[in-house]
């Protein structure tokens, strides 16, 4: 027709033929036998020939089982196809040279010359599957615990770290509910959180407690967010947690030790290897007279005479060589310039690599006990002299009596 488009000059068969061979997917048409079995290929497109390696003539003598489908699988899919009119599934195609191509198949029932046939469009999902496998490998090798949970609380996915930390096998996880692994002390918190996430809220930070298969508590920190479908419905939750159990134990131990340090009557002082003070407890304030703000950043040599600093350096060298410095007696300066007798113990402060980065000292004011010891010694000396004098006088008297 003059002035008409190219579409007007082409019949439907020509259009279908172009579409059939120009798409990038594998398209096949197979006959469906009267007994419901899959018959041979009636028609395949150019992509099927190119990707699977068989000629159109070879395909005409083949059925789906020749490229990897089992008779039982075929019969099942054909039954679904006849019942529902269409079926969607994944499987592997095998090429003529023995390679495997994972495909996603969308099949429809059609009438071809008054007979039932199946039109199938198979998309090569090799790249997507490789991407999914890389992503799964990444998740499974992550040190954090990763989980996906359905609206009914069942697990869609957990990674290897999750299984390792909590101690469950794959077959056990299939029968678990999220609340089966929540520590009893955190159940109420987790129920509230679960409800919030399924209402579309994202939880950026959460600290909670799970329990292992043998009942031990695992402290976790992480975040939870909802997976929302195209209709705006939350279909499952995604969560990433970090096991902070050991860190929490350390924090509790640090708090316990800090409480001991703060309540100690002894002077507990921490300083760097160059002598810069970075820790100063209330006991040190009381004994030395300096407040925390006054002394932090100052050098520890401020607290001792020059010769005592040299003595202290020798003790530090002893500590660095693995020795022990415990309860050695010396003298120290107070803020007002007075001195006091002290019993000092030194210990190393190490970093995570085991390197000595500072010195911790515990000083006890023993001035009172030293005075008491001196008074006792003086008293003992006084009475020793009295006794000696008494004995001398007694012996002299006895000598005089004997002369008479």
Image (tube, rainbow, N blue to C red):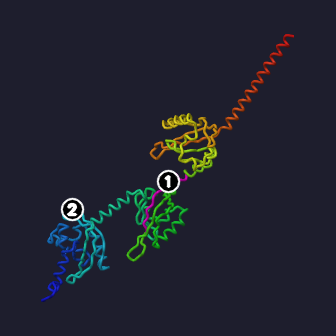
205 or 276: nearer the viewer: 276
Q: Give the position of the N terminus as an image quadrant.
A: bottom left
Q: Residue furthest right?
A: 404
Compared to residue 45, the image places residue 358 above or below, namely above
Residue 294 shown in magenta = no
Answer with left or right where residue 233 lies relative to residue 91: right
The residue to which callout 1 is attached is 247
- Given contact means CB atoms under 8 Å apart, are the residues at marks 1 and 2 in contact? no
Answer with left or right where residue 53 lies relative to residue 210: left
Q: Position of residue 318 (x, y in %)?
A: 51, 35
380 or 234: nearer the viewer: 380
Instruction: Name the disc covering residue 98, or none.
Output: 2
Count residues near mark 2 (Cα–Cα under 10 Å), then give few for <14, some for 14-19, many for 20+.
Answer: few
Q: Quadrant of residue 368?
A: top right
Instruction: Name the disc covering residue 42, or none.
Output: none
Q: Quadrant of residue 370?
A: top right
Please state the extent of the stretch shown in magenta in the rendering: 237-252
Answer with left or right where residue 171 lies relative to residue 333: left
Q: Position of residue 136 (x, y in %)?
A: 35, 61
Task: Work out whether mark 1 precedes mark 2 in sequence or the reverse, and give the earlier one.
Answer: 2
Compared to residue 399, the image places residue 356 above or below, namely below
Q: Residue furthest front?
A: 337
Q: Residue furthest bottom?
A: 2
Answer with left or right where residue 13 lies relative to residue 354: left
Residue drawn where x is 19% and y is 71% of the image: 47
Q: Position of residue 16 (x, y in %)?
A: 19, 80
Residue 244 shown in magenta = yes
What kind of element bears circle 2? loop
Mark 1 to mark 2: distance in Å? 53 Å
Count residues near mark 1 (Cα–Cα under 10 Å), then give few for <14, some for 14-19, many for 20+.
Answer: few
Residue drawn where x is 26% and y is 77% of the image: 35
């Amino acid at each position: 027709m003059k002035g008409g488009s190219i579409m007007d000059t082409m019949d439907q068969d020509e259009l279908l033929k172009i579409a059939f061979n120009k798409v990038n997917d594998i398209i096949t048409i197979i006959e469906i036998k009267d007994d419901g079995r899959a018959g041979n290929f009636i028609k395949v497109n150019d992509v099927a020939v190119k990707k699977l390696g068989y000629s159109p003539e070879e395909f005409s003598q083949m059925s789906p089982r020749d490229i990897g489908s089992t008779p039982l699988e075929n019969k099942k899919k054909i039954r679904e196809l006849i019942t529902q009119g269409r079926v969607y599934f994944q499987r592997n195609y095998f090429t003529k040279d023995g390679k495997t191509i994972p495909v996603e198949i969308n099949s429809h029932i059609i009438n071809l010359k008054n007979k039932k046939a199946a039109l199938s469009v198979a998309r090569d999902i090799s790249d997507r599957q490789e991407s999914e496998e890389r992503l799964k490998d990444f998740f499974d090798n992550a040190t954090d615990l990763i989980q996906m949970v359905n609206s009914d609380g069942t697990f869609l996915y957990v990674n290897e770290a999750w299984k390792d930390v909590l101690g469950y096998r794959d077959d056990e996880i299939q029968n678990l509910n999220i609340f089966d692994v929540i520590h009893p002390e955190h159940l109420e918190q987790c129920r509230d959180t679960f409800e919030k996430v399924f209402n579309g809220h994202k939880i950026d930070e959460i600290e909670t407690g799970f329990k292992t298969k043998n009942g031990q508590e695992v402290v976790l920190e992480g975040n939870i967010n909802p997976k929302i479908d195209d209709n705006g419905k939350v279909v499952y939750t995604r969560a990433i947690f970090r096991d902070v159990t050991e860190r929490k134990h350390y924090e509790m131990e640090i708090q316990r030790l800090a409480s001991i340090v703060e309540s100690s009557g002894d002077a507990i002082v921490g300083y760097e290897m160059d002598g810069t003070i970075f820790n100063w407890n209330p006991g040190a304030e009381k004994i030395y007279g300096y407040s925390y703000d006054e002394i932090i950043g100052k050098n520890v040599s401020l607290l001792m005479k020059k010769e005592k600093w040299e003595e202290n350096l020798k003790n530090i060298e002893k500590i660095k060589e693995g020795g022990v410095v415990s309860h050695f007696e010396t003298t120290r300066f107070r803020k007002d310039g007075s001195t006091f007798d002290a019993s000092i113990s030194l210990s190393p402060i190490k970093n995570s690599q085991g390197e000595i980065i500072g010195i911790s000292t515990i000083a006890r004011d023993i001035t009172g006990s030293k005075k008491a010891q001196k008074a006792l010694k003086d008293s003992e000396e006084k009475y020793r002299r009295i006794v000696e004098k008494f004995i001398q006088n007694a012996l002299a008297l006895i000598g005089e009596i004997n002369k008479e």
